């Protein structure tokens, strides 16, 4: 199955690090992501026989499930529909023909963020997808979720259907769960490859995610990796700070890596403008328990 991009914009995603990561992925038949997020690595690498994507964010996993199982229904829900069949005010989609994709506008972003109440899982997925594709850097933490779409640098609504269909194809037969990471790792079959991409150790990064990842959670993760290190293959990515290096000193390989990324909220975002934020150079660690060249 061909390499594709993640269907989502996701703060801290590994889109720009894909090549560096793929270079160190070993052969495997069972692949697991305990912190799936945008799952950029799963979508860009070759799909193996068995795959598990997990994330504690229920709305994210619900959206993956809807894309996997009901892609055409989601596509239809993202189109302008007659007022009698929709709870979306007609004024917000004026100028768009019936059956055409809803436009990406600040007004619709505000409506879905504050006023739309999903009635079922399909509507929950539609709301999440729309907000993700139109929010700055894909930040889904409600308090820090700001309008951030632009035709020049965002996927346009006319391309959303194609994105959903190709994502659905790759998600077929993939197990999707929303469990605590310890349960996922401790129950992973022997020999599985786990790509572990937790929230950054820097506490400031937690404002970008729906679920808070405390220092105690980072310490739980270290111990979970330690007790499973001899039966599982781990590829862990973290922000490159001294404390993380010390915590994972028992792992055989730590590699310094750099790439450009965009996660910090800028003054432009605070002012609710649609100007694209500048990207910065991030220094991160690749932590592995298997040998590489």
Image (spheres, helix red, strand yellow):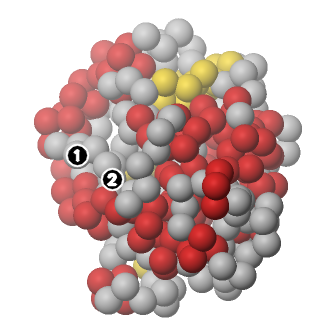
Q: Is residue 28 left or right of residue 202?
A: right
> Relative to 85, does residue 122 appear above or below in the rendering?
above
Q: Position of residue 112 (x, y in %)?
A: 45, 61
Answer whether residue 231 is visible to the viewer in this image: yes
* Image position of 288 with respect to 131: above or below: above
> 64 or 218, which lies in front?
64
Query: Is residue 259 something that shows in the picture?
Result: no
Q: Residue 191: where, in percent of width, then height?
A: 57, 14
Where is mark 2, residue-wise? 209
Residue position for label 1: 212
Q: Which of 253 and 207 is in front in this view?
A: 207
Q: Quick check: 117 above or below 133? A: above
Mark 1 Cα shell of 10 Å, populated few (<14), some (14-19), many (≥20): some
User: Image check: 185 left or right of 80?
Assistant: left
Instruction: Say whether marks 1 and 2 touch (CB < 8 Å).
Output: yes
Q: Residue at x 31, y 16 (%)?
A: 227
Quadrant of the image for the N terminus? top right
Residue in the picture at 60% in, 21% down:
175
């Amino acid at each position: 199955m061909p390499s594709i991009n993640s269907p989502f914009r996701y703060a801290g995603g590994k889109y720009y690090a894909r090549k560096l990561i793929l270079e160190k992925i070993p052969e495997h038949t069972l692949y697991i992501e305990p912190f799936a997020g945008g799952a950029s690595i799963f979508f860009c690498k070759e799909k193996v026989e068995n795959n598990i994507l997990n994330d504690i964010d229920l709305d994210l996993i619900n959206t993956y499930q809807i894309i996997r199982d009901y892609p055409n229904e989601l596509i239809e829900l993202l189109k302008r529909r007659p007022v009698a069949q929709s709870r979306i005010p007609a004024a917000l989609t004026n100028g768009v023909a019936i059956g055409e994709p809803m436009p990406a506008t600040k007004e619709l972003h505000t409506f879905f963020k504050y006023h739309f109440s999903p009635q079922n899982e399909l509507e929950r997925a539609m709301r999440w997808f729309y907000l993700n594709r139109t929010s700055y850097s894909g930040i889904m933490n409600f308090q820090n979720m700001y309008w951030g779409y632009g035709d020049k640098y965002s996927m346009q609504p006319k391309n959303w259907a194609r994105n959903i269909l190709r994502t659905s194809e790759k998600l077929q037969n993939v197990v999707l769960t929303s469990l605590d990471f310890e349960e996922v790792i401790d129950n992973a079959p022997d020999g599985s490859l786990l790509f572990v991409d937790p929230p950054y150790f820097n506490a400031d990064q937690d404002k970008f995610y729906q679920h808070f990842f405390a220092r105690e959670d980072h310490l739980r993760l270290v111990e979970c990796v330690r007790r499973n290190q001899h039966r599982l293959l781990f590829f862990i990515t973290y922000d490159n700070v001294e404390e993380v290096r010390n915590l994972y000193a028992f792992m055989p390989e730590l590699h310094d890596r750099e790439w450009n990324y965009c996660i910090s909220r800028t003054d432009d975002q605070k002012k609710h403008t649609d100007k694209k934020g500048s990207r910065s150079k991030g220094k991160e660690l690749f932590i592995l328990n298997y040998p590489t060249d």
